[in-house]
Amino acid sequence: MKVFVGGVAAVFLGVISMIIFHRPFFELIAGAIPLILLLGGAMAAYLGYDEVKDKIPFPKNKESREAAESSGESKFKEEAERYKQEVEKLKAELEKSKSEG
């Protein structure tokens, strides 16, 4: 209850102070808005840059870039070959079960 009464008293004094000192209050707010926009924009730009940098791996030299591209292609080829083998295996099992049943 004491906290509630203290909060109401603080709100009341704050409203009275804003009425009495309205000009300095609005000058303070007007001065703070550009600073908040500047710092918020800088933080958003940094976080966006960091996110983009994490999503796009960029090898430093040409040789490592070519190696990364070829290893990526070979991974896809190996995976495709593995899936083809699995499909053939499943087809054989399906044919076997049809012939038995």
Image: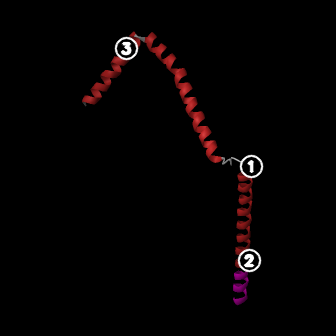
- Taking depth in this image into account, of 2 and 74 the one nearest to the observer is 74
The mark closer to the camera, 2 or 1, is 1
What is the three-letter code of the residue carrying label 2? Glu
What is the three-letter code of the residue carrying label 3? Ser
Image coordinates of residue 3 in percent, x first then y, are 28, 30
Give above or below for 17 relative to 100.
above
- Taking depth in this image into account, of 33 and 8 the one nearest to the observer is 33
- Taking depth in this image into account, of 87 and 96 the one nearest to the observer is 87
The mark closer to the camera, 1 or 3, is 1
* Residue plotted at (74% across, 58% down): 70
* Residue plotted at (33% across, 17% down): 13
Query: How would you rate the neighbour count of disc 3 (Cα within 10 Å): few for under 14, some for 14-19, many for 20 or more?
Result: few
Q: Earlier in the sequence, mark 3 or mark 2?
A: 3
Read off the magenta span. 91-101
Give above or below for 66 relative to 82.
above
Q: Quadrant of the N terminus?
A: top left
Q: Earlier in the sequence, mark 2 or mark 1?
A: 1
Q: CA distance from mark 1 to mark 3?
A: 66 Å
Residue position for label 2: 88
Residue position for label 1: 62
Q: CA distance from mark 3 to mark 2?
A: 82 Å
Query: How would you rate the neighbour count of disc 1 (Cα within 10 Å): few for under 14, some for 14-19, many for 20 or more?
Result: few
The secondary element bearing badge 1 is classed as helix
What is the three-letter code of the residue carrying label 1? Lys
* Residue plotted at (55% across, 33% down): 43
Image coordinates of residue 61 in percent, x first then y, are 71, 48
